[in-house]
Image (cartoon, grey):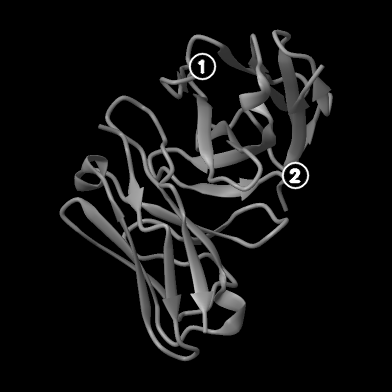
Amino acid sequence: SSELTQDPAVSVALGQTVRITCQGDSLRTYNASWYQQKPGQAPALVIYGKNNRPSGIPDRFSGSSSGNTASLTITGAQAEDEADYYCNSRDSSGNHPFGGGTKLTVL
Amino acid sequence: QLQLQESGPGLVKPSETLSLTCAVSGGSISSSTYYWGWIRQPPGKGLEWIGSIYYSGNSYYNPSLKSRVTISVDTSKNQFSLKLNSVTAADTAVYYCARGLYFEWYIDYWGQGTLVTVSS
């Protein structure tokens, strides 16, 4: 199956750590990438590969993977991190499905 | 700095064909390093991968849309296109074009997105 599953919503207290997960069979073979989307904006890459950040992404964002689960961790969440987060990967058929998205609320 | 710009009608009638173009500037669409794709987002909902096309010319489409979708590349104009046939109101969405890294399989550049409404 090429489906990727995410929790619909997660909340975190300001300055605390939060982990957003993505599950799918394809993640046993292919790395997940993670995208942040704020209202009215196009998505933006925050994590790719094993655990790589594009230029300009704060180091409080990190990625990890185990088995069929990929995780995005924000260590010391800030108010500006409140957004929707999507995982994406490739499967063996050449599809590139997205997870359903996780709405992160910073309290 | 690479830029992607979607263009096309903002309003399409039911049963007709949605056609969008993505103009690529600041980089070549012919590079074997990248693939090119379309993603959409219905109002208030999540991202949905529509399809991708590789340098080799191979294209891959979301199985749920495969019968209605065609993605093509025009190297002479440095642009790629999306055609979605037999549209319904369910195809109303913001459509994004994007560039991905071949073998790394992540999207590094997105267009700003264009809203396409399907309505009579």
Type of amino acid at the residue the image marks with label 1: Gly
Q: Where residue B40 sits in the image (x, y, percent)? A: 60, 36
Give residue B83's quadrant in the image. Answer: top right
Residue that numbered label 2 is attached to: B26
Q: How crowded is mark 1: few (under 14 residues within 10 Å), some or many (20 or more)?
A: few
Q: Looking at this view, is B15 or A30 the one in front?
A: B15
Residue B3 disc label:
none
Compute the Cα span from label 1 to label 2. Answer: 21 Å
Rendered-image quadrant of the N terminus of chain A: top left
The residue depicted at 74 percent of the width and 47 percent of the height is: B112
Give residue A40's quadrant in the image. Answer: bottom right
Whether residue B24 can be seen here: no
Q: Residues within 10 Å of mark 2 (few under 14, many from 20)?
A: few
Report the chain holding disc 1: B
The residue depicted at 64 percent of the width and 25 percent of the height is: B91
Instruction: Kindly state the secondary structure of the residue where label 1 is placed.
Output: loop
Residue B57 disc label:
1
Type of amino acid at the residue the image marks with label 2: Gly
Whether residue A22 can be seen here: yes
Left or right of B47? Residue A88 is left
Instruction: Kindly state the secondary structure of the residue where label 2 is placed.
Output: loop
Quick one: label 1 or label 2, which is nearer the N terminus? 2
Q: Looking at this view, is B18 or B1 the one in front?
A: B18
Q: In this view, does B49 lie above or below B101?
A: above
Q: Where residue A107 sits in the image (x, y, percent)? A: 52, 84
Residue contact at pointers 1 and 2, CB within 8 angstroms: no
Report the chain holding disc 2: B
Q: Where residue B110 sits in the image (x, y, percent)? A: 64, 46
Q: Where residue B79 sits in the image (x, y, percent)? A: 72, 26
The residue depicted at 44 percent of the width and 75 percent of the height is: A11
